[in-house]
Image (cartoon, rainbow, N blue to C red):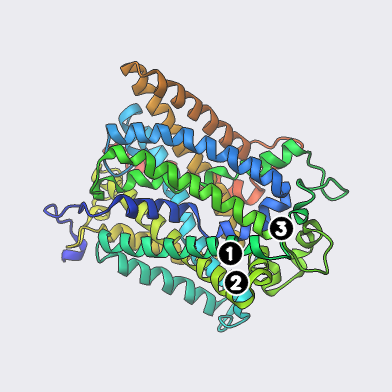
Amino acid sequence: MLFFTVNSERHLNKKLTPLNVWSLAFGCVIGWSAYVMPGNVFLKNAGPFGTLIAMEAAMIVMLIISYNYSYMIKKFPMIGGEFIYAKMAFGKKHGFLCAWFLSLSYLSVIPLNATALNLILRAVFGRTFQFGFHYIVAGYDVYFGEILLAILTMIILMFISFGGVQFNGKIQTFLVMILLGGILILIGAAFLNPNVKSSNLIPMFHPINENFNKGILAQIIAVFVTGPMSFVGFDTVPQLMEESDFSSDKVKIVMDTSIICGGFVYVALTLLACSVFPPVFSSWVEYNDALPRLGGILAIPTINASNMILGKIGIFLITASVIAAMLTGIIGFYTATSRLLYSMSRDKMIPEWFSYLNKNGVPTHAGIFCMTIASFTCLMGRPVMGWVFDMASTGAAIGFAYTSISAAKYALAEKRVDILIFGTIGFILSVGMTLLLLVPIPGLNVSLNNESYILLITWIILGFIFFKVRKKSL
């Protein structure tokens, strides 16, 4: 019976160091997308220089929003983050609304990272895990072996997390060192490799032709709008505050460095992806256009570049780095989501069952729920998860908006001009990013696709129903 009851005598344990929290945040910022998006999104939409401008602009926006987070964390140093800020500033209904979208934003990344393991393994090891029953979803082949690998990976990491947040933090820090180490070695080797030439980066933007009609500004915006989900992860820091054994004064530098390092990795991998390409192609544009027709390591420019720079050693380094990134993404977002659900349950917004803590102070029921939903999602295939991920970008932007406007409200009462300015700017920018995702603008083509709109509407309806059911507790 203990498993189904809440033990009020147990509590979260303060065991995380600043390095552990930074690793959890940075590990969330850099997941599978940092290695795949250079070819599939960044170069495809804006070229190397357009990506550089867009990601640096997105990074500046995130640093502004981070300023608001650090202010709110000092006021409310408890797990729940944006949910707590919205609730305290505007009431429980706003807190629920913020948490409903934010939980989707966090939760959607877990299965995406887990199934992305298969993308890398397909490229490096071929059909090794393509066994068992097989079906097709939206043109994507789903195999039992790959589903099994993704689900087992998540389950193993979940049980590891049950050992306590301190052990979890140490594992995350170790994986982040592998992630960064592989990237830094490859970047250093690229400077010494004669095949890597600055001239390979030309054209700096994607050229306009019969198949591509975006101007320079539209190209930059197309990549900039990915900012909410590219940098989401630094905002998991407040979810860990009740388990962090250090002053909240250090929080800002933890978040800011995770954002800056994340921006560096995104840009570095994008430049790496187009700085060297197969000799059969005349430019990165021609190579990138051919990606849908290619297979193996050629289909992922970052892996191909690593192979051309360091051969098998390069493949080993990039594979180790990307697998570490995926694992850190799973661990980080799993930790953040389970803590968010725990906080909501503690406030009686969702059933008390979610606030159960095991003997190590870990919200295991919330964690089991996260992994159950994530495991079920793995069955849907990556195209469907991609639609969910795109839709979940709005959740991240809504979380940023609530934090910023909450900071502005408290700053106005306290006459903190700096926070009032940053809070207002952060709110406007967050709302702007949300509108870019939701409102189709001719010539930009950066809004959600039809499938993502349908899923977003479905999520809103489900939230409305759940809100009505739980209304008495709100």
Amino acid on which disc 3 is placed: Cys
In front: 360, or 464? 360
* Up-down relation of residue 469 to residue 167 (above or below): above
Marks 1 and 2: in contact by CB < 8 Å? yes
Left or right of residue 367: residue 265: right
Q: Which amino acid does label 1 sit on?
A: Leu
Left or right of residue 274: residue 142? left
Give percent across and percent down for residue 310.
63, 72
Label located before the other in sequence (2 or 1): 1
Quarter-wise, where is residue 331 in the image? Answer: bottom left
Q: Which of 368 and 317 is in front in this view?
A: 317
Real-space CA distance between mark 3 and mark 1, rounded to the nearest whole angstrom: 14 Å
Point out which mark residue 186 bears.
1
Q: Badge 1: how crowded within 10 Å, few (<14), some, or many (20+)?
A: many
Tag 1, which secondary structure? helix
Can you tell which mark lies on residue 314? 2
Q: Where is mark 3, residue-wise?
A: 274
Image quarter for residue 307? Answer: bottom right
Q: Relative to 405, is 456 on the left or the right?
A: right
In the picture, the quarter occupied by the C terminus is: top left
